[in-house]
Image (spheres, rainbow, N blue to C red):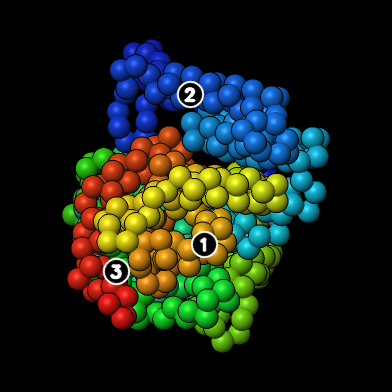
């Protein structure tokens, strides 16, 4: 088993030339000033700042523990974003530092191991190996390509559409990534887009960004939205319904997000398929026993995920059970050799680490303090709807920068009533505005499913950051303003009595 993926820093080229594998950002070609040098420098400076804050605690009116957690967070997030070390390394660093310096109880420090998202990621690792080893991925990929065209452009469009349709079947974006990423990797192989090709990176980005971001327009398809809806009902007695929620978010934000992701992927990761039906027809072959067993396991898992409202089983434990059956000798689809040789558990350890860090941040009170300070610095005012809308997006992301998108609703939802009074909005509008802020991603740590999905697809975190920044710029410049006007047309900013 490998917790940290081996990675050579040197790529051999013809005529004896050598170049660093890390001297380029995936899909963007060589960088004149050296992407690796910039990443190393940024990581060094950020870690140094984190250490200074950690040692100098307490600072800025924070408790000593909260200050140290802030320093640790800055260092860990910098290492994750820059990708100068394996994503598993900062996770282990968090565990060690938290325990040595007694920043949180062990139950909090290692709480990521008990989180459903972590085990969905683990299941995704196992399913990915099985889909590749049995050949089922190639079969499904060929079926998808047959429907959307055996071209790179058609594959990108089809991936985003399928990712959106999965949102209606699977409540967890982490689970959707776990199933989709192995499929698009098989699709990339079918198109001749091998490891290192821009098109391969583009297909992974289309799958991950497409299914996570488009899912925000569907009420049960995103964890932050589910948390917000649950808190709204318990705190205010406001029940957010599926239909009205989709009416507010899908026509503007949802559709435009899908179109924008397709356009961005084709622009940032241009490529051409090297395999066409005329060049290399896919031979017809019978289903192997392993393929049949794996298909049965996946159908059963998807069925249980889709009907969770009937049986109440967590998607995480359903996925884990499916992964265990998948790895059972003679019953599943993997043998012991595949488990030992092909397994890369880095995405799983990363997910555990990022969830544990969020729990430590909440436990020490850092997230609450930051949320209060951010809200204190805002200036909501009745009648200034555009300004208030932009402020809500800013507040959400200022908190998400530390607590991740899933950590914002528990902090922001209890403040919704006060914000509604200050802005002159209905309470429901303030609650809906949570979602408008979820789309923004300045760095991958803010949206863990995107980060984990990229790791499952072996896309560098630096490349994921660039894609996220380009998406965020487009969202803030175009999609968010259009969403605001759609909301105004729906009368979202008017009180019932006005």
In the foreground, 34 or 396:
396
Marks 2 and 3, how far apart at CA: 42 Å
Sequence order check: which comes first, mark 1 or mark 2?
Answer: 2
State whether residue 71 is above or below residue 431.
above
* Quarter of the figure that contains the C terminus: bottom left
State whether residue 23 is above or below residue 283.
above
Q: Which mark is residue 493?
A: 3
Sequence order check: which comes first, mark 3 or mark 1?
Answer: 1
- Residue at image position (26%, 68%) is 487
- Residue at image position (74%, 52%) is 108
Q: Is residue 316 left or right of residue 19?
A: right
Q: Position of residue 392 (x, y in %)?
A: 39, 55
Q: Position of residue 122 (x, y in %)?
A: 61, 56
- Residue at image position (46%, 58%) is 177
Where is residue 283, by image quadrant?
Answer: bottom left
Marks 3 and 1, how far apart at CA: 18 Å
**Residue 127 in sight here:** no
Quick check: marks 2 and 3 in contact, CB under 8 Å?
Answer: no
**Residue 39 in sight here:** yes
Identify the residue position indicated by label 2 in the image: 42
Sequence order check: which comes first, mark 2 or mark 3?
Answer: 2
Q: Position of residue 393 (x, y in %)?
A: 38, 53
In the foreground, 302 or 242:
242
Identify the residue position indicated by label 1 in the image: 415
- Residue at image position (35%, 68%) is 425
* Quarter of the figure that contains the N terminus: top right
Q: Residues within 10 Å of mark 1 (few under 14, many from 20)?
A: some
Local SS, label 2 = helix
User: Which is more foreground, mark 1 or mark 2?
Assistant: 1
């Amino acid at each position: 088993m490998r917790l940290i993926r081996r990675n050579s820093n040197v790529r051999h080229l013809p005529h004896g030339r050598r170049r660093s594998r890390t001297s380029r950002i995936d899909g963007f070609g060589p960088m004149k000033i050296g992407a690796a040098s910039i990443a190393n420098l940024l990581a060094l400076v950020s870690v140094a700042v984190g250490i200074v804050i950690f040692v100098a605690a307490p600072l800025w009116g924070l408790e000593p523990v909260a200050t140290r957690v802030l320093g640790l967070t800055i260092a860990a997030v910098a290492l994750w974003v820059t990708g100068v070390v394996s994503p598993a390394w900062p996770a282990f660093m968090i565990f060690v530092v938290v325990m040595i310096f007694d920043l949180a109880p062990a139950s909090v420090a290692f709480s990521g191991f008990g989180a459903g998202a972590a085990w969905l990621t683990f299941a995704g690792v196992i399913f990915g190996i099985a889909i590749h080893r049995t050949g089922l991925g190639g079969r499904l990929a060929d079926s998808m390509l047959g429907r959307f065209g055996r071209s790179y452009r058609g594959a990108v469009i089809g991936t985003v559409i399928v990712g959106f349709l999965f949102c209606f079947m699977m409540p967890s974006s982490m689970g959707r990534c776990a199933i989709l990423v192995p499929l698009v990797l098989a699709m990339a192989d079918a198109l001749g887009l091998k490891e290192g090709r821009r098109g391969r990176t583009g297909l992974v980005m289309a799958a991950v960004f497409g299914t996570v971001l488009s899912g925000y327009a569907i009420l049960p398809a995103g964890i932050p939205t589910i948390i917000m809806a649950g808190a709204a009902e318990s705190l205010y007695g406001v029940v957010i319904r599926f239909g009205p929620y989709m009416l507010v978010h899908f026509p503007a934000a949802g559709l435009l997000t899908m179109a924008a992701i397709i356009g961005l992927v084709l622009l940032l990761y241009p490529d051409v398929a090297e395999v066409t039906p005329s060049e290399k027809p896919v031979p017809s072959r019978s289903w192997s026993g392993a393929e049949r067993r794996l298909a049965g396991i996946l159908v059963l898992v998807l069925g249980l995920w889709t009907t969770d409202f009937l049986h109440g089983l967590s998607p995480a434990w359903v996925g884990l059970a499916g992964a265990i059956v998948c790895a059972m000798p003679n019953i599943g689809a993997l043998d012991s050799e595949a488990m030992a040789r092909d397994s890369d558990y880095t995405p799983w350890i990363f997910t555990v680490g990022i969830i544990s860090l969020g729990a430590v941040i909440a436990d020490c009170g850092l997230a609450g303090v930051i949320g209060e300070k951010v809200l204190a610095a805002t200036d909501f005012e009745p009648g200034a709807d555009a300004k208030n809308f932009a402020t809500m997006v800013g507040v959400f992301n200022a908190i998400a920068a530390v607590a991740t998108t899933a950590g914002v609703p528990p902090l922001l939802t209890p403040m919704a009533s006060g914000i509604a009074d200050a802005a002159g909005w209905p309470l429901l509008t303030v609650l809906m505005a949570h979602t408008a802020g979820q789309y923004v991603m300045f760095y991958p740590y803010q949206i863990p499913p995107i980060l984990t999905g990229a790791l499952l697809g072996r896309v560098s975190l630096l490349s994921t950051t660039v894609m996220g920044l380009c998406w965020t710029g487009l969202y803030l410049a175009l999609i968010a303003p259009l969403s605001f006007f759609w909301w105004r047309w729906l009368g979202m900013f008017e009180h019932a009595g006005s």
